[in-house]
Image (tube, rainbow, N blue to C red):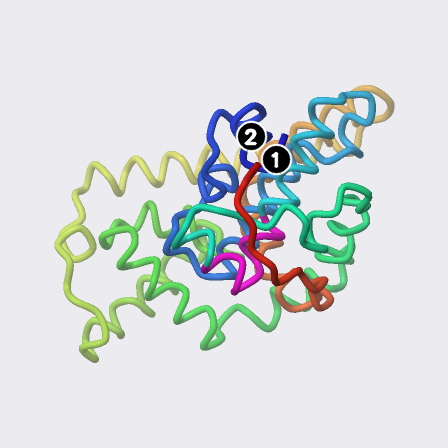
Amino acid sequence: MGLLDDCQELFGSSDLYEVLGVKRSSSETEVRRGYYKNSLKVHPDRAPEDQQATARFQTLGKAYAVLSDAEQRAVYDEQGIIDEESDSLKQERDWDEYWRLLFPKISLQDVRHFESTYRGSEEERLHLLRLYGDCGGDITRIMDAAVCAGPEDEPRIRSILQEAIDDGDLPALRAFTHESDTKKAARKRKADTERAQSERLKEELSLEGDGRQTAIKRRGAARQSDFCSLIGRLEEKYSRKKPAAGRKTKKQQ
């Protein structure tokens, strides 16, 4: 079987974009993030004995290898075919090594450095302006999607967006300018709940044995979404140059 057959069998779709969870119009960076997020779910380190997970991981790598190559992606977009004999799809390729080359381990120091340089930067401002449009001015959705931002950052983020509106860089969307008291109250309740949970986790993390391990697992699960969003930006800064891909095109067998 070829790659498209594998995609259909393992993911229920032969569309490489659907397999990676991205749109056909997605940028190279967005395709890369889609690969990262989906491959985390089936990485061999999570379930080394699960053969289907390993097969899904390898197939995700192949799908990304095709879409990350400009020429192969163009041919796939235009004709729906891929080159099964290209260097990027070699059967003997170590897909775990390929993944680690793309996404080298990022240290806590890297994370802290990113946060310190990102907050208040032009990069953050442009990201918030884009989120404003994507979220239709809904501040709740903007806060959920913003990187390195907690409830305490809302006044600062509101100020950034309002300044952009005043300067004519953004339209004055009603969802932002006339938010209902009900939505504000709901967001405050959510922030208060998260704050209380954070305090409980801090207490639990001081426990010994099983209690501590349970707290760590819950904390990791709760922050997985935020981590993926942050890591997507960090890997752009610290990842190595991606491996070269083949150039030939050949119809799926």
- The label on residue 153 is none
Q: Please report the residue visible at 29 percent of the width from the left and 59 percent of the height from the top.
A: 132
Q: Residue beneath label 1, please?
A: 2
| Callout 2 secondary element | helix
In this rendering, is residue 235 above or below 96?
below
Label 2, residues with CA under 10 Å away: few <14, some 14-19, many ≥20:
some
79 on left or right of 168: right
Going 26% across and 74% down the picture, which residue do you hit? Answer: 163
Q: In what quadrant of the picture does the N terminus appear?
A: top right
State the residue in front, 37 or 151: 37
Magenta stretch containing residue 142, yes or no?
Answer: no
Q: Where is residue 112 in the image (x, y as percent from the top left)?
A: 68, 63
Q: Is there CB contact under 8 Å for labels 2 and 1?
A: yes
User: In this image, 57 relative to 25: left or right?
Assistant: right
Helix, strand or loop status at disc 1 = loop
> Which residue is rendered at x = 68% and y = 32% of the image?
42
* Alpha carbons under labels 2 and 1: distance apart: 5 Å
Q: Name the residue under label 2.
A: 5
Provide the major secondary structure of the magenta segment: helix
Q: In this view, does 114 lie above or below 23?
A: below
Return the residue nearer the eye: 95 or 153: 95
Q: What stretch is highlighted in magenta?
A: 64-74
